[in-house]
Amino acid sequence: MPSPIYSSVKRGIQRADALKRWLIILVLLLCAAPAQAQENKLNLFIWSEYIDPQVIQSFEKAYDCKVTVNLYEDNESLLARLEGGGTSLYDVVVPSDYIVHTMISRKLLAPLRHDNIPNIKNLDPRFAGREYDPDNMYTVPYQWGTVGLYVRKQPGETIDETWGLIFDAKKQIGSFLIIDDARTAVGVALKYKGHSFNSTDKKQLREARDLLIEARNRSLGFEGAVGAKNMVLGKACRVGMAYNGDAVRGMRDDPDTYYFIPREGSEIWVDNLAVPARAPHRDMAEKFINYILDAKIGAQVSNFNQYATPNQAALEFINADDRKNPVIYPPPDVMKKLEFVKDLGPRAAWYDELWTSIKLK
């Protein structure tokens, strides 16, 4: 039989061992808590007025997380932010089609793990696998739309639906704004002259530059699409280059305004969801992308911002009036006049140089 002293020492050692084990467990729990809290976050970098706040709230509830939303107004700002260290700040970004290839080539995006995004099957084949990301390795389509003119009408007025409202002083019907986006502004000037939106002919580009400089001198200046819509709504100008979804919401607020795609043609674009290369919450980012690709959630996004959905499964849940609205879903004859902005490789720098001269002269 062990002596009383031995038993007492043994019990003391056992208690010390038990206390040590509990201390180790406590330390592990304390260390794990911040990691868990850190994981339950999502940092979204997106265009303004581009997602239903209720979608954000429902995602937070579904995944017990906190979503922080930061805004930008053009692709160039997004690109500059990511190149300046933003790849480790944001979890989901929303680049337009033509800039995706640049982001991939500069290693700014992380590959998507499709096993985590089963709802990718819901995409409309017309918008999935486009040339800038053929296998949707880095991006999935979010919304698509067009660029046109958003105009305030006068009673009884018939408006000539042409880019000449911007580029021909004789057709100008009042004050106007030029969209603050190099590829779009130069592209519509090219379309007005009967050229491709993606021309790399230097003579045609100089022609577009001269048109824009002349128009700039008659204009109220350059403005983002949302700002232009708001200025037309506020009666600060009569004509603004705008995105169709912004314009649809403006027309709902003021029936004396309307949107059209000029007869010369314009741009069709696809915005995409992507994960930056060093996203701090990559798993949550892919959960968010999968959530947006759900048929009903995808429809909720489009019903809110009134852009067209690239989610084929969502179409049955889109508001009936929106499905029939030619401003949101253009008819075939208009679709034939639209061009996607293409990645031009090194020649894209020509547009940047042109844009600098247009802004400075």
Image (spheres, rainbow, N blue to C red):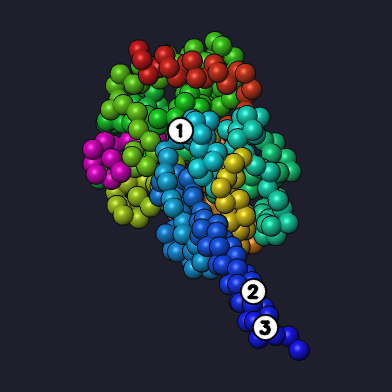
Query: Which disc is residue 7 wearing?
Result: 3
Say what amino acid the circle numbered 1 marks.
Ser
Residue at which label 1 appears: 77
Label 1 to label 2: alpha-carbon separation: 63 Å
Of 95 and 19, the residue lying toward us: 19
Q: Quadrant of the N terminus?
A: bottom right
State the residue position of label 2: 13
Identify the element where label 2 is drawn: helix
Instruction: Report, in whole angstroms, how far the alpha carbon at label 3 lies from the one at label 2.
Output: 10 Å
User: Which of label 1 and label 2 is nearer to you?
Assistant: 2
Residue at 23% from the left image edge and 41% from the top image edge = 235
Q: Are marks 3 and 1 in contact (CB under 8 Å)?
A: no
Q: Nearer the viewer, residue 330 or 14?
A: 14
Q: Residue furthest right?
A: 1
Quarter occupied by residue 22: bottom right
Q: Is residue 335 visible?
A: no
Quick check: 15 above or below 82? below
Residue nearest the viewer, comparing 150 with 9: 9
How far across and down, in percent of the image, does residue 61 sit?
Answer: 49, 68
| Residues under numbered marks 1 and 2 in contact, where contact means CB atoms less than 8 Å apart | no
Q: Which residue is drawn at the image coordinates 62% and 55% (left, top)?
A: 283
Q: What secondary structure is marked by label 1?
A: helix
Label 3 or label 2, whichever lies nearer to me, is 3
Going 70% across and 85% down the picture, which residue do you hit?
3
Give left or right: position of 259 versus 115.
Answer: left
Front in this rendered view, residue 11 or 3: 3
* Residue 38 in picture, x, y percent from top left: 52, 55
Which badge, 3 or 1, comes first in the chain's sequence? 3
Q: Residues within 10 Å of mark 2 (few under 14, many from 20)?
A: few
Q: Which kind of residue does numbered mark 3 sit on? A: Ser
How far is disc 3 from disc 1 in space, using C-alphas?
A: 73 Å
